[in-house]
Image (cartoon, coloured by chain):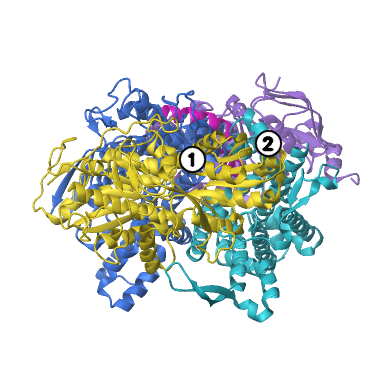
Chain colours: A purple, B blue, C yellow, D cyan
Amino acid sequence: MGILEVKDVNKRFGGLQALGDVNLSVAENTVHAIIGPNGAGKSTLLNCLVGKLIPDTGSVMFDGQSVLGRTPFEINQMGISRVFQTPEIFGDLTVMENMLIPCFARRDGSFALHGIRSVTSEAELRDQAEQMLEDVNMLDKRNMHSASMSRGDKRRLEMAMCLVQNPKLLLLDEPTAGMARADTNNTIDLLKEIKETRDITIAIIEHDMHVVFSLAERITVLAQGTPLVEDSPENIKGHPKVKEAYLGEAA
Amino acid sequence: MFGLNKKDGSLLLLVVALVVFAPFLLNPFPESSGWAQFNAGYPDLMQRFVIFGIFAIGFNILFGLTGYLSFGHAAFLGVGSYAAMWMFKLFGMNVLPALALSVVTSGIFAILIGYVSLRRSGIYFSILTLAFAMMSYSLAYSVLATDMDGPDKQGLLQKGLTGGETGLQLTQSDPRIFGAQTTADGNIPVPSLFGLEMRSATELNVGDWVFTFSAGYYFSAVIMLLAFYLSIRIFRSPFGMVLRSIKSNQQRLNYTGMNPRPYMLAAFVISGMYAGLAGGLMAAMDPLAGPERMFWTASGEVVLMTILGGVGTLIGPVLGAGAIKYMENIISKINSDILHSWFAFLPDGLEDIVVTMIYPFIGKGWHLTLGIIFMLVVIFLPGGLVQGGQKLAAMVRRKKTDDTKTATTEPAE
Amino acid sequence: MSKGNLTRRGVLKTGAVAGAGLALPTYLSAQDSGFTNAPTGSTVTLGFNVPQSGPYADEGADELRAYELAVEHLNGEGDGGMLNTFSSKALQGNGILGKKVEYVTGDTQTKSDAARASAKSMIEKDGAVMITGGSSSGVAVAVQALCQEAGIIFMAGLTHSNDTTGKDKKANGFRHFFNSYMSGAALAPVLAANYGTDRKAYHLTADYNWGYTTEEAVKSSTEAMGWETVGTVLTPLTQTDFSSYITPVLQSDADVLVLNHYGGNMVNSLTNAVQFGLRDRIANGKQFEIVVPLYSRLMAKGAGANVKGIFGSTNWHWSLQDEGSKAFVKSFGTKYGFPPSQAAHTCYVQALLYADAVERAGSFAPCAVGEALKDFEFDGMGNGPTLYRGDDHQCFKDVLVVKGKENPTSEFDLLEIVEVTPVDQVTYAPDHPQFAGGQLGSCNNGA
Amino acid sequence: MDAIILQILNGLDKGSAYALIALGLTLIFGTLGVVNFAHGALFMIGAFCAVTLSRLISVSHKVEIPGEVDFLGNQATRDVPYIYSIFGETAGATIIDWAVPLSILLAIPVMILIGVIMERGLIKHFYKRPHADQILVTFGLAIVLQEIIKYFYGANPIPTPAPEAFIGSFDFGALIGFDPGTIIYPYWRLVYFAFAAVIIGAVFAFLQFTTFGMVVRAGMADRETVGLLGINIDKRFTIMFGLAAAVAGLAGVMYAPITSPNYHMGMDFLVLSFVVVVVGGMGSLPGAVLAGFLLGILESFASMREVLDILPGLNQIIIYLVAIVILLTRPRGLMGRKGVMED
C-alpha cells in the first residue's frame, strides 16, 4: 500500500479523454517519476492530485484518506506540497517573507487571525525558515525582493517554501524546465540531499531524462492519458513500449 | 516601542506629534494677513482630516494589502453614521456607545456584503460592492425615508429609518432614555463624552495668531491614532503578510495550505468597521447622517484618497485624505473678492488679468484643480504623495552627500 | 483670551491679544457678548452658503449675485434697490448697526454634508454671524439644524419643502420662500378654472422628501376642487430618462399629469412627456394637460419650448410691476445685464430682512434678531404685504401662478404671470397636518 | 398587453443608449486593458457637440425692435442669426432646426481627434500601470473635461430639440392591430433606436469583416502574441480608442434631444455603463450589447406602478440587484471570458 493510491481515475474534457483508467501507487519514501510525451495527461493527473481538478470517476487516496472534493489548501494541509512548472512565489514579498507564509500555514492551519502579533516576534518560525534557506544556499538573499531574482533562484525558493512545510509528499512539475545545465545539476543534488536527509516521498513529472534517471526509483510512463508501464529506471530505459510512445510508430 | 520596530515607532511618533500640534501646524498664517484664507486649523476641518484619515486607513487595509478594490466602502460609512444617530436618539448623547454601535453595525453589514462580494475578484468584486452601496444609498434616500410611523406622523419614525434627503437628525421629542431629552435652555443636547461636549473648544491667542483646541478634534484624533497604530500592527503581523501574499499570488497561497477566503473576509470586515467608526465619528462631531454619504462618489473619494496618498503605504491614505479635504474646504471658499484683495498691489489692468487667469481654478472651480492634481500626481508620482515625499527626501540626502563629497574632494565617479 | 464653544475670529481680528495662556475649557458659559461670533470691530461677516458646483450651480451663482448686490445696498453703495421701497426704514445704508458688511462664501454642492461643512467653516473660521442661501430643502434643513445648534441665525434660500418650516422647523431658522402647501393652494383654483373640476390627475413624484410634500399638497388641494387622483408613482432622483414612467400615463384614464419634479428631473420629465405627445392627447374627451407645481425660470430655460402653456407656481418673477420688484430688477439688471431669478430675489430679500431685524433689535444676538423677525409685517419687497409668522418662521405673502409663455421675446422671458394668488388663500394654521410634528424649540444664542 | 409592449419599447430605447456607451467602454477594456473613467465624459462631450453646433449656426446679431423696450427700459432688440442672411430666412431656420443630426458631422472628427489625443497623450503611458492608477488618471481627466464644459456652458441643462419633423409620436399600435393612440412612440426615440442599431452593427461588421478588425480581435484575445507577429498593434489600438470615443460621442449627440445636456450627464451614466459592461462580461462586445438591452428592459418594467405597489423602491435598485444576481450566478457576466480583469 503506497502513500498515494490512484485508482481507475478518468477525466474527460468535452470530447477529449484526458485520463483513462489511471492507476498509480507511489510508495512511501521513494522518488517516483511520471514521464510521457506532451499531451500524455501528466499535468491533468497532477491537477487531480492537488484538488485543482476533480476526476470524473475513480479515487485518489493519500495517506489513507481520499483527497477528492477537497480544496487545494486542504490537500496541502494533509501533507502534499506542490512545485509548479513556472515558479509560483509571492513576487511582492521578500525571500524571508516568502518562507514565513508556509511556516504560518503549517503552524496555524488554513486560517488564523494573528492580526496583532508582530512578524518579528515569530523567532521560532524565522529560525526554521533561515535553516531551510541555508539548506538551499539562499540565506544571503533572504532580504531580497523575490520578484527580482533569477528564475533558478525562484525555483529554489519555491522548493524551499514547499520543504519548510515538511510535506509527506512533494509534487514536482518539471522542476528543471528551462534551467541551464549547471542549475539542473544543482537541483538534482539538492533533491538527492533532501531524499537522503528526510522522510519524504517525491513524485516528479519531468521531461529531462537525465534528471529522471538520476533521481527516480520508480517510473510510470503515461501515454494518451493511460499508464503504459511502471517499472524501475533500469527496466524502463530499454522498454520498447516507451520508445514507441516517445518516438511514434516508426520505432 | 508598543511592539513596533524602530522605523514604525518613529513614524507613529511623528504622526502623534503632527496630530497633537495640528492646531498650530494648520494655522501658520496670522489672522490679519491675506494668507489666513489658507489656514485650516479650525475644528470642523481638523475633525474631517482625522475622520477621513480613519476611513482611508481602513480602506487601505483592504485595498493596499489585498489589492481588492471595493467601490462601495461608503456604504459602511453611512451605516456607521445612521447607527450612531439612532444611538443618540434612543439612548443618549454619550459618544462611546454610539461609536460602539457604529462599529458593530457596519461590521455586520461588512460580513454580509463581503461574504457575497468576495466570491468574485477583480472588477467583478468592485462592481458587486458598488451595487450593494448604491442599493443602500437609493433605499436610504427613498423607501427607508418614508413615513413608517402610522397616520399621526408625530413619532420617532415620521421620516423613516434614514430621514432621506434631509438626513437623519435629532429632535427634541427623541426618547433618549439615559439622557436628557432637551437641555435646560430648551435645545437639543449635543454629543458628549461623559459630559465633555464634543463641540467645546478653547482658544489660545499669540500675537496675531489664534489657535483653537477642540474637544471633538482631540477625541477624534485619539481614536485616529489608535486606528493608525492598529493598522501598523496589522501591516506588520502574520495576518497582514498573508493579505499581501493574496495580492501577490493567490494560487500559491492556496497551494501553501491557506484558505484566502476567510483572510479576505476578515480584511473586508476590519476595513468596513474602520469605515463605520469614521461614520460614527462624523455623526458624533456633527449629529446628522445623510444618504449621500453612501453615494458612489463618496466611495470613489476614499479610493482616490488612498491612491493619491500612496496605496499600501501606512501614512499615504491619511495624507491623501487631508489633501482632498483641504481642497474641498479651503480652495472652494476663495472667491473673486479675496483674489482681488490678494493682487491689489498689482496695477489695475494686470490685477484683472491675473485674477481672471486664476479664477477658474479656485472657488467654484475647485473641482478643476482637483482633477488636474489627480492627473499630475498619478503621472509623475505613481506611488502617490508618499513617493513624492521620498523623492524629496532622497534629493535632499543626495545633495548632502554631494556636499560632503566635494568637501572631502573625492574623485568623481 | 477667550473661551467658548466656537471660534470667534471677529473678536480676535480687532482685539489682538498679546501674550499666551491656556484657559480651562468651560462649557456653555456665556461670553461677554452672550452669543456666538458677536462682531466687535467695525465690520460684520455674513456667510453665503450656495451651491457652486453640482446641478444647481447656476442657481447658486444667481443667489450669490443677489447677495453681493444686497451687501452693496446695505453698505450704502449702488442705487439702494429695495431699501427704497421696503416698508421698514430702519436701515440707513451704513452697514448693519453701523458696521460695514463683509461676506464669505461657501459651496454646498447640494449635499447636506458638504453644506454643513462649509457652513461650519464660515462659523468657526470666518466668524460669520448669519448663514444664508441654499437651493434645496435637504440642504436647508441640514444647515438650519446646524445653525440652531451653533447659535447662529439661518435665513433659508430657495427651499420649498413643507418640512423646512414644518417638521424640521427651528427657532434660529427663517424662510421667506413659499412652500409646497402654498403651491398647491394657489394652483388648485387656477387649474379648476382653466381645466374644469372634473379631472383625473396622475402624479409623477421625485422620490425624496420635497417630492412627498409637494405631491401631498397638490393632491389635497386639487382633490378639494373635485379632481380625482388616479395614480402616483415615485421616480428615483437619479433618473434621467422618464420614458418608462410616462408611458403608463398613456394607459391610465388620467387627463392631467402632475410633475412633482425640480431641477434636472423636471427638465427631463417634462421634455419626455411632451415628446410622448401628451400635450396633443385627448383623454376622457378633454385636452390632456401637464402641470409643474414648482417653476423656476432657470429650469424653464433648460426645458426650452416644452414649457409653453404649462401651469405652475413661483415665488416671484421679475416681470412683477410693484415698486419693490421694479427697483430690484433695475439694480440687478444694471449690475449684471439680465433679470434676476426667484432664487436671487428670495436671497436678496432674506439678506435685507436680516439686516433690518438686527437694526430694529439693536443687536446681532440671534434671540434678539429672532424676536424682531417674529410676526414682523412688512411690504415693498415684491410680494405685497408679508408676514413673518412667529409660530413657524414662515413668510406669508402672495403666491404667483404662472405659465410657460407662448412667444418669449428673450431667453429670460419664459414665464408669464397668470394670477397673483392673495396671501389669505395660501395661509394655513401652524398645526396643519402637512406641517405638524416638529417643534421650533427655543432660540439659541450659542457661545 | 399594450402596457407591456410600451415598456419593451422603452427598454429597447434605454437599452440602446446603455449599449452604445458600454460598447465603447468594453472596446477600450478589451483592446487596451484600460479602465476608462473618462468614458462618460466622452458621451457628455458628444452631447455638447450638438449644443455647440446649434449655437454656432445660430450666432446672431441684434436687430432693434422699433417701439419696444426691454425690462430695464432700454431699446429692445431681437436676435437674428447670421445664417439667415446667408441662406435666407427659411433655409436658415431649417438648418438651425436640423442642428442635432447635422452635428453628427462635427462630432465624428472631433470625437476621433479627442480620442486619439487622449490615447497618445495620456492613456498610452498607463497600459502597464495598475488599474488603480488608470482609474485615478482617467477620473481626473473626466473631472477636468466636465469642468471645462461647465466653465463655458454653465451647469444648467441646455435644451437641444430634435428637428421639427421628428417632434411628435408614431402610432405604433395602429400598425399591429391595437386601438389607435394606445401604443404611440416618439419619432426621435425610434430614430435613436435605429441609429444605435446601425452603429452597433457597423462596429461589429468592422471588427468581423476587415483585416484591421481581425487584428484587433486577435489583439483583444492576446495582446502579446500579436505584438510578436510584428504587427503594429499599438497604432491600431490608438485608432480603436478614437473609434470608441466616436461611438460614445455619437451616442451623446443623438441623446441630446432626449435629455437636455448638462455638464455632469457623463458622470450620471458612468457608473451605469460600468455595470452594463461588467454584467455583459468584461471585454465582450456582444455581452455589452445584450446586457444593455436586458438592463434597459428590466429597468422599464420595474418602474411600472403595478410592480412598485408590490415592491416599493424596486425601480431604485433594479439595475444593481440584477447585476448582483447575474454576477453571482455567472461569475464573468453574461458573456465574459476567463481571466479578463480578474486580478
The magenta-colored residue range is B103-129
**Chain of the residue displaying label 2:** A
x, y percent for residue D99: 66, 67
Q: Is residue A240 left or right of residue D122?
A: right
Give the residue displayed 34% in from the left and 41% down from the top.
Answer: C144
- Based on the picture, tell me whether residue C418 belongs to the magenta stretch: no
- Name the foreground residue: D16 vs D117: D16
For mark 1, name the chain: C
Which residue type does callout 2 highlight?
Ile
> Does the segment drawn in magenta span residue B122?
yes
- The x and y percentages for residue C405 are 56, 58
Q: Which residue is mark 1?
A: C185
Above or below, A69 relative to C181: above
Q: State the residue in front, B384 or D207.
A: D207
Image quarter of the C terminus of chain C: top left
Q: Which of A49/A183 is in front?
A: A49
